[in-house]
Image: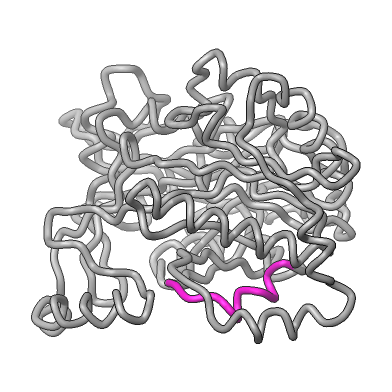
Amino acid sequence: MQQAAQKHIYDERLTIRGTVDQDDLKLREIINIPLTTKGVLLSFQREPSYFQASKVIYKNNDHSVVEDDQNRMIACFSNGSRPCYVNQEIKPLRYACDLRVVSAQRGKAVLNLVAKRMRETMQNPDFAQNIIFDDNHAARTAIQTSKFGLPQYYAEGAVQTLTLTGFQSEKKIQAFFGQQYQATDINKIRSCVAEPKHIEQMNQFVKEMAQFYNFIPAYDFNELLQSHPYFLGLKLNDFHLYFDEHNVLVGMFGLWDQHSFKQSKIVDYGKIIGFARPFYNVYSKVTEKMTLPKRGQSFHYHALHSLLCHPAQLALHHRMLKDALRLSKQKGIDNVCFTLSKRDPRYQLNQFYKGEILSGTHGYVSFNSDPRPSIDEAYIPYFEVGRI
């Protein structure tokens, strides 16, 4: 149902516009504003360039900023698009993110302007995906309740991001697989590092996986050889491929180190966490948990790019995660990160994994009709953790 029209009074001292190249520094200052989560003050940074970091999220950028009457930037948001498989067809899909408002200006006037801008620019498609994590209370209040003239919110389902640090008993995992997953079947699968000769197979494999998953970006891995900004921080040999005994590609993932353009920096700890951190880190190393960096340092992890296999191939998914964590540690990074819909059969295996969990909700925003009926629920939502 179309959202009912609402009257809004706009503060004439505020203006909203699309971004220009000269906005990069001020955008980073706003994006870097710290947020508190679980007693930790975190700054989600995009250094050295906000626009460069955004190119891994969007193929078509759509950034907006709000300024006051002294030309001070006080808010920003992004609502660009990228080509994705939706119901097995390649379509532009918007993803709304990076809504930030400086603390002194938070309130109705700014969000009214944001809503006005979204209504004017959110075309083709006229809805956007978003993911709101459970501890982001401000975003949940503003977006999920559709206040301040913002578009109507339509929930799709729960998601979980896991920063994987280790595994529980392999015996328990194999027991969960049961008799249908024989070790000999997995042993027949060989893996290798991707080479230029594999690119067309990789492109075709993504297309085949769109038979099972919605929202997979429509990748052309030839762009890796062209150093396309959409693959910033990735090289072809960061990808690992899995072939069955018939030389058919059945699984893949890439190890994506985004630290050169995207950082999660520790600004401060609460008193208790700050005092306990050295002791906690000793405990974490023994128990394969995530260690806490010093103040001023960033978390370091590999985002798993295109973590794909048939959704029923749980044993293969598990093997790929074991390989990913092992290869990541060989590169000096002790964690790998991925996001799964709770409707994804592979999500069941998270119960056997160690690491830090971030839960949230995937949904859509639209000023027009509910987009959910046009998106076939037979497909499993897929999320590229490095692009959200």
Report whether residue 369 is seen. Answer: no
Q: Quadrant of the N terminus?
A: bottom right
- Identify which residue, 236 or 91, lies in the foreground: 236
Tell me which residue sits at (78%, 60%) in the image: 186
Q: Colour scheme of this structure image?
A: one colour
In the drawing, does residue 276 fall left or right of residue 212? left
Tell me which residue sits at (26%, 18%) in the image: 22
Report whether residue 102 is seen. Answer: yes
- Identify which residue, 60 or 379, lies in the foreground: 379
Placement of 13 over or under 168, stated as above or below = above
Rendering coords of residue 259 (x, y %): 33, 41
In the drawing, does residue 71 fall left or right of residue 346? left
Rendering coords of residue 331 (x, y %): 37, 46
Rendering coords of residue 251 (x, y %): 74, 47
How many numbered callouts? Answer: 0
Tell me which residue sits at (46%, 68%) in the image: 141
Residue 284 sits in quarter: bottom left
Tell me which residue sits at (89%, 75%) in the image: 180
Rendering coords of residue 119 (x, y %): 59, 38
Q: Main secondary structure of the magenta part?
A: helix
- Report the magenta residues as a range: 346-355
